[in-house]
């Protein structure tokens, strides 16, 4: 007699842990799907602001256009630059990486801006300021009229970036803007599921410690 043994499910294998419209990693096929499109197609056909609009639309359930994202990020970069004296004050004596973490933890909600725009817009401003400070230079003011990638490079390099440099960084931003359920993004989703405030004074104090 031949017995046909079937494999029993192990642990939570095959049981959905969460559902999302943002992105999906298909490990077997080696594909990353962001906002319903293969990441390679997005890099070729669109830019960071456009992909961000898709993600914010999917995450909030309200349509957000590319122009609105570009305007929001430009305004957020300007707001972050205006707050640099306060943000950099808590980074004294820290490395660029540690200073970046501390400054991000010091962000607060900005009137008229969505939290996600406030945070994403502040990233290049803070990074650029810390890089310039390490060189003994003053921070470079942002330009709200250019793309997020172009402004990031300008504030870090202290010069107008070339077209290829902007395209390369923009493509990188697209590829890392969301990454399904890997360790870091899964942890982020777990925290978000608690409905903790994105810009929370209590959270900032906890992180600062």
Image: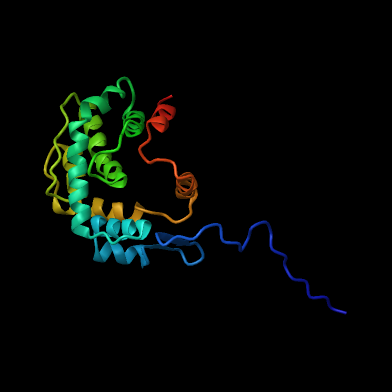
Q: Is residue 182 left or right of residue 77?
A: right
Q: Which residue lies furthest to the front in this view?
A: 111
In the image shown, does 198 or 186 lie closer to the viewer?
198
Q: Quadrant of the C terminus?
A: top left
Q: Residue furthest bottom?
A: 1
Q: Residue furthest right?
A: 1
Q: In the rendered image, which quarter is residue 92 located in?
A: top left
Q: Residue drawn 27% across and 58% down?
A: 53
Percent coordinates x, y for residue 8 in the rendering = 72, 65
Vertical order, 194 against 52 (above or below): above
Q: Is residue 77 left or right of residue 182?
A: left
Vertical order, 94 against 47 (above or below): above
Q: In this view, does 36 lie to the left or right of 113?
A: right
Vertical order, 192 against 20 (above or below): above
Percent coordinates x, y for residue 16 in the rendering = 56, 61
Percent coordinates x, y for residue 151 in the rendering = 17, 44
Q: Quadrant of the N terminus?
A: bottom right
In the image shown, does 10 or 207 lie closer to the viewer?
207
Percent coordinates x, y for residue 187 in the rendering = 49, 45
């Amino acid at each position: 007699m031949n017995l046909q043994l079937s494999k029993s499910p192990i642990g939570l294998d095959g049981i959905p842990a969460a559902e999302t419209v943002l992105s999906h990693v298909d490990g077997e096929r080696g594909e990353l799907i962001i906002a319903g499109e293969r990441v390679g197609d997005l890099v070729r056909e669109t830019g960071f602001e456009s992909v961000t609009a898709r993600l914010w639309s999917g995450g909030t359930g309200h349509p957000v256009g590319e122009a609105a994202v570009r305007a929001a990020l430009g305004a957020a970069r300007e707001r972050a630059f205006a707050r640099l004296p306060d943000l950099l004050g808590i980074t004294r004596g820290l490395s660029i990486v540690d200073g970046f973490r501390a400054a991000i933890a010091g962000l607060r909600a900005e009137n008229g801006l969505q939290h996600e725009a406030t945070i994403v817009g502040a990233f290049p401003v803070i990074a650029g300021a810390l890089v310039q400070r390490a060189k003994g230079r003053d921070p470079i003011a942002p330009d709200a009229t250019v793309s997020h990638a172009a402004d990031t490079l300008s504030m870090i390099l202290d010069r107008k970036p070339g077209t290829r440099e902007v395209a390369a960084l923009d493509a990188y931003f697209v590829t890392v803007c969301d990454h399904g359920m890997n360790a870091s993004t899964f942890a982020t989703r777990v925290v978000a599921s608690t409905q903790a405030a994105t810009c929370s004074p209590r959270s900032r104090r906890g992180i600062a410690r």
